[in-house]
Image: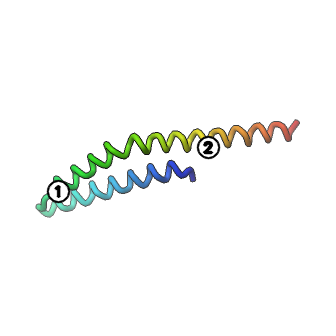
Amino acid sequence: MIPGIALVQTEILVLFLLIQLSAYRGALGEEAQGIMIMVLLIAILASPLLLVVFFLSLQRALDRGKVLVEAGVRSAD
């Protein structure tokens, strides 16, 4: 798996975990606003960084695939 994708998946997993926790606490009548503020902060602050990491990882994978295809074409000739 591409490391950048794993990082993005981890962020999404943490955000959904916090959203579920907030929904659970809200259903019990407890305060959940602080958790939702934390979800918003994590999403806003981490997303630009993860987007850069994701695209750089994707570009490396595409370059690697291109090299492999070119090597395969050369060996077939």
Q: Which element type, helix, strand or loop, lies under badge 2?
A: helix
Task: Specify which label sits upstream in the sequence, 2 or 1.
Answer: 1
Q: Which element type, helix, strand or loop, lies under badge 1?
A: loop
In the image, taking residue 2 as reference, residue 8 lies left or right, namely: left
Image location (x, y in percent) of residue 37: 21, 49
Image location (x, y in percent) of residue 13: 38, 55
Q: Residue at x 25, y 52 (%)?
A: 38
Q: CA distance from mark 2 to mark 1?
A: 40 Å
Residue under label 2: 61
Q: Of all residues shown, which one is farthest toward the right? A: 77
Image location (x, y in percent) of residue 69: 74, 39
Q: Residue at x 27, y 54 (%)?
A: 19
Above or below: residue 75 compared with residue 33: above
In the image, taking residue 76 as reference, residue 5 lies left or right, namely: left
Q: Residue at x 27, y 50 (%)?
A: 39
How many C-alpha atoms fall within 10 Å of the one at disc 2: few (<14), some, or many (≥20)? some
In the image, taking residue 67 as reference, residue 46 lies left or right, namely: left
Residue under label 1: 32
